[in-house]
Image (cartoon, rainbow, N blue to C red):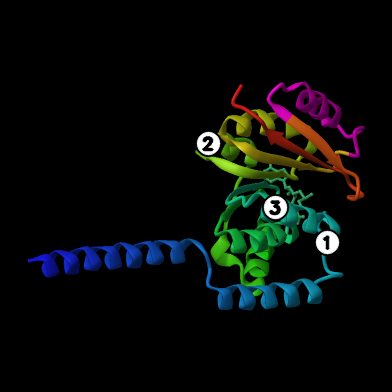
Amino acid sequence: MKHKFKFNVLFFSLCVFLCLSIVASGFYPEPEDVQAIDEKVKNFLESHRYQWRDMNVSAVDGKILYDLIIAHNYKKALEIGTSTGHSAIWIAWALSKTGGKLITIEINERRYRQALENFEEAGLSDYIDARLADAHDLVPELKGPFDFVFCDADKYWYKNYLIAVLPKLEVGGCFAAHNVSGRRQRGMRDFVDYLESLPNVETTYDRSSWSGISISYKKSNK
Ligand SMILES: C[S@@+](CC[C@H](N)C(=O)[O-])C[C@H]1O[C@@H](n2cnc3c(N)ncnc32)[C@H](O)[C@@H]1O
């Protein structure tokens, strides 16, 4: 009887362990997968180094986004303004390590299709949900939650994107916006003033980026 009880406990523990391992493996890639992805992405980035001509971020800026995601273990990312996918590739590369996924939005069909090809070639399609849509309409409709948002579409709409997305950003999450150095661009001053007026958001600027990236952390819900 005692033996049977011990066996049942052992069997139950083994089942729990196996289930947890299976669930965990669904979220985190195996080390050999990580290596294969790394190699494919590095090759892709190297071979396309001089081919980003659609208002894409620089490799320096891509690395800033990558580092932010890794440092905070972000998993639920949104990008507004895919273009042909350079920043999305850096973001998704980081998410391939944290076990996350990116939703990215582009309004221009040619760039969207080129981005899909690039994601495939870089081996990152599984980590990206690319949408061909007007972000003015789609961003307010997205349910979230998100823990990382990269804003890089129509500058005059940045403030509206922030207003739509902030309630869906988790506390501790990050809203990064590109091209904030060009504060004379239509709407940029408005956006930066609004960003800095928010009591529950803490903002710094990464000056290693030539274009200027604002990096804002949500500190609380109100
Ligand atoms: C600066 S580019 C994005 C570059 C991209 N993040 C990269 O580094 O590869 C801005 C993109 O936003 C897109 N865009 C502009 N307005 C948009 C809107 N309302 N909805 C979705 N995309 C939009 C443009 O078509 C353009 O491709």
Q: Considering the numbered disc 3 on the image, is that residue within a helix, a strand or a loop?
A: helix
- Where is residue 45 drawn, in percent x and y? 77, 71
Would you name the residue on which mark 1 appears? 59
Q: CA distance from mark 2 to mark 3?
A: 29 Å
Given the image, on which type of amino acid does mark 3 rest?
Answer: Ala
CB of mark 2 near ligand 1 (< 8 Å): no
Which residue is labeled 2 in the image? Answer: 141
Kind of residue at badge 1: Ala
Placement of 58 over or under 201, stated as above or below: below
Q: How many marks?
A: 3
Could you tell me which residue is drawn at 30 percent across and 62 percent down? 16
Mark closer to the chain start, 2 or 3: 3
Structural crowding at the residue carrying mark 3, measured as other residues with C-alpha within 10 Å and reported as few (<14), some (14–19) or many (≥20): few
Q: Quadrant of the N terminus?
A: bottom left
> Secondary structure under badge 2?
helix
Q: Is there CB contact under 8 Å for labels 2 and 3?
A: no
Residue underneath mark 3 = 71
> Which segment is the magenta one?
181-201
Q: Is residue 33 left or right of residue 50?
A: left
- The front one of 67 and 156 is 67
Circle nearer the N terminus (1, 3): 1
